[in-house]
Each structure stands twice: as structure tokens, then as C-alpha cells.
Amino acid sequence: MQRMHDQIKNDKLERERRSRIPLPPPAPDRGPIPISPFRRQEGSDSTNPIDGKRRKVTVNSPLERAFQNNARHDLDSRIARIFYTGGLPFNFARNLYYRNSYAYTATHSIPSYVPPGYNALRTTLLQKERAYVERLLKPIKDSWIENGASIVSDGWSDPQRRPLINIMAVSDGGPVSIKAIDGSGEFKDKHYIAGVLKDAIKEIGHEKAVQVNLALKNICAAKNTEKNEVTYDKCSWITPIADDASFIRVFIMNHSMRLAMFNEFCPLKLLQVANTRFASVVVMLKRLKLIKRCLQAMAISDQWASYREDDVGKAQKVKDMILSDLWWDKIDYILEFTAPIYDMLRVADTDKPCLHLVYEMWDLMIEKVKAAIYRHEGLEDDQYSSFWGVVYYSIEWLSENPKCIPPHQDHEISMERSKCLDRYFEDENELAVVKFEFAKFLGGKFPSPDALTDRWVLQPLVWWQYHGSAFPTLKTLALKLLGQPCSSSCAERNWSTYKFIHSLKRNKMAPARAEDLVYVHSNLRLLSRRNEEYVNTATKMWDIAGDSWNESDINGGAGILENAALTLDEPELEAIVIGNASTSVTTSDSEVQSEAN
């Protein structure tokens, strides 16, 4: 590096030497000669006697005037003052609409322009923007008539325990925010939630709503109720392990000296993942396992034993857990049998249509989970595991045959399909037609040879759009089903809406105006994610992170969750996270091991 630096310096001096043009001395009867722009302006080693007396070149050169550098610097300072005085986060500088507004100003000459004032922003411009958003959403809403939409919702609370329920409609055209409900003062039981969802269905039209569903239950936090007694008995051992892991993290993070010891032994950070995050228990336990050797080296160190200024009892408890092989064995077991579930949910946790992938993924996931549980319990395939029996809703619901079979040959699926068709097509003539078309479809009677070969080339939704004309009644159902998402991830990731709504309440904004503002706020953000510039320009993922976020900070995929306030449902973000995950984790693991050794 030093040699390269010296070479660059020498090359620069050589170029400057060659650029100097010696001038003849001035005649006795003439004034000073004009200064050549190619001459050195300061610190010149030229022997020409005029060098010491020449004038400096004017700072505001023609080139600078052409680019208006002074005006640009002045404008930068004025914009910066908006951030400083308004308390705006620096991340706002990546806002797509912020940058576009200045780009528009730079390309349009608008003399004497004055930005909109307080009243215009909250009245006429807000109504105009709502109408603009409605026009942008119209093609998506029109597609619901043919393709249907899923009503998805998610609820959470802020640190002050104020609840919010986010309602959205999702289809293959993308998510649309319907409303965000402040649930303060409401008893949020099943009747209240059902009423909220019914209102949302009425708002978009019941003929357009396809599904509102829940696939899995929380096996990492089973509740002790009368109806859930068996499940709680078999799964309750998981919750204390998660609580212990959280206890270790909180103890270290809340004591500065213990945290300093941890940082000395481990190059990675302890994750703080909130309960509302994607698979928060699994993410936390995965990180603890990754830094296991570091934690153990810290716990047996002289620094840990000699420091006695904090709660010694809690410090001993943390040490005992970290050094307990039995405790780590339980963590390994939890991660082993939840890994297939976690992987499947991560694939399905998107607002993109992936329902056609669920059947095969579900069967493979079930086989892997069962294999992990049976291997741990030392059971054969034909034996019964009570823990396996409660991981899912019922043992009878799952097929005991480990061999995958086509869905139309699965007896359970065939029976449920018949129930679905009977309920969906109330007219007997339509029901007869769809049954005939389904039998024709199963028999492979397609309109062209391409229809058969395209089954392995095209996505199912595309196939039905292109070849479905031979089965028109069945096509309507296929398009509605295959265009639906498998999760409510789009509702979960709209975290900024919560703070926004309560800010409106504090400002005593009229309910109708607040509703318009939330509608515009949420949908403009969702719409911006469909543009190419959202992933390829300076505004890349502008709405998902705070000032501390940087792509280089992503380590192993999970560390981004707390800063970005996201689930792993961002297609673009997940490409970055998961794409780097294997490299990052491998590197981190080697660093951890070297530190521990």
C-alpha cells in the first residue's frame, strides 16, 4: 500500500511538471502577463520571478458558474436545517417522494413558488392525494372481482400497551391497506375480532373475499387452559427454556460490566427480538447456540468470578445455565424439530402467491419434524409419540404415510374439495359443470399438447390464465385460490402506521381526516414497493429502516429484525439477508470459535 501511495504521488508530480508552461519575462514597457490556467497556483517551485507576484484565479470560475456550485451548497445547507430543526430522522433523506419533489423542482422553472401551507396540507391537498391513491389502487381492486382477495390482519401493542389492529386486502396484484383500528378500551376476544373482520369483508364485498385463515398454533408458548390441557402438558417445557434464554440476554445487557465482558469474548451481538417478530423464540435460541462457546468462556473466566458489584445470585444463575449441558441439549432439540417449520414459514411468509407450493412443502415439513422428534425419543415409525401428537392440531389430521402422493389421490383432500365445491357453487347446474370440468382436467384432456408440457414450465397461476379457457368454471375458482397469499406478513410489516396513528390522536385531528391520512400514508408506502427504483436506486427500501440501518450491518439474517422492525417477509430484503446468510454465519462461527479458543 505504501509503494502504491508513493507511485501515485510521483505520477501526480510528474504530470504537474509537464503541465507547467514557461513564459518569457515581460517587456519593460508592458504590464504583468495573464496567468496561465495550467500554472501551479500555490506552492509553485517554478523559478519564474512572476510566480510570487501573480494573482490567484477567481474561485467562481466559468465551470463552477455553469454547475452553480455555490447555489447547490447553499441549498444543501437549507435542506439540512429542515432536518435539524424539525427533528426528522436522517433516514428520511432516502424517502422516494422527498427526493422526487426536489428533482421535479430542478427540472421545472416555477418562479415565485411558495410551498403549501398548514391548512392546504390538511384539507384540499389531503383530499386530492386520497383521490390520487384511489386511482392508483383501482386496477388492483377491479382485479378482485375475478381473482378475489384475502383479508389479513395483525395486531400488536406498543410499550405503553396501546393496541392496534391492521386490516389489509391482499391478492396477486399486491397488498392494499383497508383500515387501521385503534383497539384501546375494547375487549379483544373472538367476537370483537370476528366483528372487525366481518366489517372488512363487507367493505370490499363478500363476493371478492376468498379467505381468512390460521394454519399453525404457537407451540413455543402453549397456554394452560382447560381445552388446551394436553397440549400444555407436552409443550410447556419449551417456554421455560425460552424464558431462561431471555433472562441471560437481559442480565448481560442491563449490566455494563457484564456486557463489557461479553463484548471482550464474543464478536457478535446479543439479539433483542420482540415477541411480535417472526419466530422470535427460534431466532433468539439460534443466536445463543451460535455464541455458545463465547458464553461459556466468559462464564468460566476470572473476570466473571471476580466481579461482584451487581446481583451475585443472578450472575451465578446465568453461569449455571450457560454451563449446563442439559440446558443446551434442550435448545438443540427445540431448534432441530422447529427448523423445518421455520424454513417453510420463511418461504410462505410473503404477500406473493405461493399457495401452490404449500401442499408439497407441508408434507415434507411434516416428515422432517416427525423424524427429528422420533429420533430424539428413540421411537420407530410405527410407534406413537405423544409430543408429536400435539405439535399439530390433531394426529388424525396428518397422514401417517411418509410417501408423497398426488393431491387429487389424497382421500382427505378429495373430501375437503368436495365440501368446498358444494359450498361455493350453490347452483346445482354450476356444480355439475365444475365437477365435469374437474374430471376432465384430471384426465389430462387439455386443448393443446402445450398445455400438458407447460405444467412443468409455467407457474400454476400463469398456466390457468393461459390454458384455463378449456375449463371456464373451474378457472374462476383456480384463479381466486392460486392468487392468494399464505400469510399476513404484509399487515405485520406495516409497523410505522402504529406510531403515526397515535401521533394523530395526540394532535386531536378529526376522525375523518385522520382516516384519510392513514389511508394515504399506508398505501403510498405499499405502492412504492412495486417500483423498480425501490430496489435499485438511492431510495432502496427507504421505508423499512431507521438511521442506524446499513446493508453492511446485516449478519446472518436475523440481526436486521430489531432495527428494521420487520418480519423476514421482505422479498428484496430477504434476498440480501438469506443470500448472505450462509457466508455470514460461517464467518461468524469461525470468529466465535477462535475467540473462545
Image: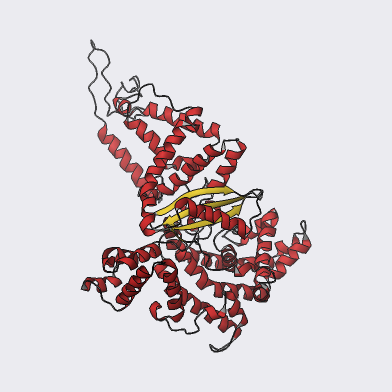
Choose top left, top right, bottom left or bottom right for residue 357: bottom left
- Which residue is situated farthest in the top direction here? 29
Left or right? Give the position of 517 relative to 407: right
Label count reads 0
The image position of residue 579, as x and y in percent, is 42, 62
> x, y percentage for residue 289?
59, 69
Asked whether 17 or 536 is in front, the reply is 536
Residue plotted at (58% across, 79% down): 388
Q: Is residue 540 among the parts visible in the rendering?
A: no
What is the x, y in percent for residue 518? 51, 43
Which residue is found at the position 43% from the left and 57% from the top?
A: 207
Name the foreground residue: 477 vs 36. Answer: 477
Q: Is residue 246 above or below residue 498?
A: below
- Can see residue 403? yes
x then y, percent, for residue 516:
49, 40
Left/right of residue 158 with respect to residue 8 in the rendered view: right
Q: Nearer the viewer, residue 527 or 265?
A: 527
Using residue 159 as the reference point, say whether residue 466 is left or right of it. Answer: left
Name the residue: 57% across, 52% down.
165
Compared to residue 486, the image places residue 196 above or below, namely: above
Question: Split into 4 quadrants, where in the image is the C terminus?
Answer: bottom right
Colouring convention used in this rendered image of the protein: secondary structure
As drawn, 470 above or below 497: below
Towards the viewer: 60 or 520: 520
